[in-house]
Image (cartoon, helix red, strand yellow):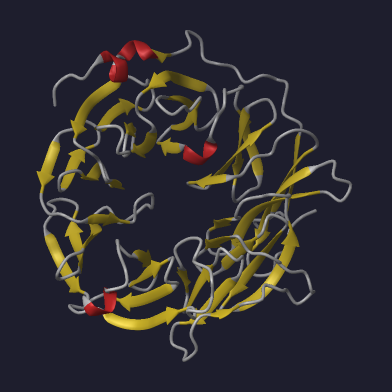
Amino acid sequence: MGNLPCLSFCPQQFHRPKEPAVVSDDRAPLRIKTDAGGGLWTLGASTGVLGRPVAVDGTVYVRVSGDRIAAVDADAGRILWYSEALAEAEPAGLARADEVVVVPVRRESDRSGFTALEAATGKVRWNRRKSGLHRVAAVGATVLLWNDTSDDRGKIAGFDALTGEPLWEDEFERIWGLLVRGDRVILDAGGHRALDARTGEELWHQGYGTLLGQGVTGDAEFFQSWNDGPYPELSLRSCDTGRQLTTTRFPKRALKHFFGPPAPADGGRVVFGRAFERRVQIFAHGGREQAESLAGRRLGRWRFTSFRDRPVCVGDWVYAVTWRNRLHAAEIGGRRGLRRLTVTAPDGRAVQRPTEIAAGPEHLFVADGDTVAAVRDGRVLWAAATLPYDGSPVPLGTDRVLFRSRSRDRKEVRLHCADAETGRRLL
């Protein structure tokens, strides 16, 4: 692992305050209303910013006025802390590493900054002002910074979460993917490689394929990889050794219209999708040597459109939203193919032009920048007004969802933690 240029990794780039940073008594103008024991709450801001929420390990982080971050206990509906002002903070890319939360700040095309906040108090632990590394992940008490773009070589480095001190560094021709599993990080970099997250020591180098489940917490003992080619297969591998434990082969003929790896779904299934041909294929692989085709769906050729994003599978239904702002759905075991689903709730409120979908464990959430709706088993359960031009809602476990709205007098912005099944929220 040799030394890399000081430009990327030199310790002097870290700045730690001589005295612990003190959060100002000038609290952000936030109010929170909670439903004792019900898990529902609403955060309100009278003026300024209330950004898109990010949920990590039972805490919701949101950017508020004054370039600060607020942390809310997701279950109790209690404001935990406000940070001091952070320049151009991007909570969407944050990572939690034991006792700190690392937030990307001042992101530019060729460099990024990072600020580590104490998870319990929001006080600043350290700053990394300039870095040629752009992505952040966390393993225990170690923060990982790395690159995965074609313009940058595959650099990766480990830092102590509490102090920000460099622990190790390495470089590959390119890092195509990264998984965090237990106390190690698994890379797709010239084959599968496992590194000890604390020391950077390479523990094994074995096997090839696209890593599945990136960005999702998984079992520390296993990981999945996909191999395309003459004999497509999905492998379950050991995190300890990299050895292939089980293999499920997929019929090449059935995949002739698809390129790239599938998206994992619940129940031991995977979903293949192709945007321009508007095709979806779903297979069951759990415990099988040969994958079983569950459904193949396609929109008619006459439809002049394509999928916006990958189709998603929730329960026994598959959903896809098109560039013509239509939601299509099909039951996996049913006889009908993808059909347009009109997103109108029982009370008549509707998502007129769906643009965003977010899949929860049991519900699909649909949004169009004015309204959000919940769908279960192909049926629209409820719909509610959102903050104008808002992005997709954020599922919170199996039974709740986060979305923003504005009060009727338009003086207050609200973040709702609402019931996923009924849409009930506190006003």
Percent position (x, y) of residue 44? 75, 42
Residue 285 visible in the current orientation:
no
Residue 418 visible in the current orientation:
yes
Q: In the displayed structure, does residue 176 sit left or right of residue 384? A: left
Percent position (x, y) of residue 169? 22, 26
Q: Quadrant of residue 378?
A: bottom right
Q: Residue furthest top?
A: 18
Query: Image quadrant for the N terminus?
Result: top left
- Picture layout, residue 143 above or below residue 419: above
- Picture layout, residue 11 above or below residue 240: above
* Residue in the picture at 81% in, 42% down: 412
Percent position (x, y) of residue 233? 19, 68
Q: Quadrant of residue 183?
A: top left
Judge by depth and name the residue closer to the eye, 109 or 41: 109
Q: Residue furthest right?
A: 409
- Picture layout, residue 150 above or below residue 286: above
Judge by depth and name the residue closer to the eye, 162 or 374: 374
* Residue in the picture at 20% in, 79% down: 290
* Residue in the picture at 73% in, 50% down: 388
Q: Residue furthest bottom?
A: 335
Percent position (x, y) of residue 87? 57, 22
* Total marks placed: 0
Q: Quadrant of residue 64?
A: top right
Q: In the displayed structure, does residue 253 sit left or right of residue 371? A: left
Q: In the displayed structure, does residue 115 sit left or right of residue 281? A: right
* Residue in the picture at 51% in, 41% down: 92
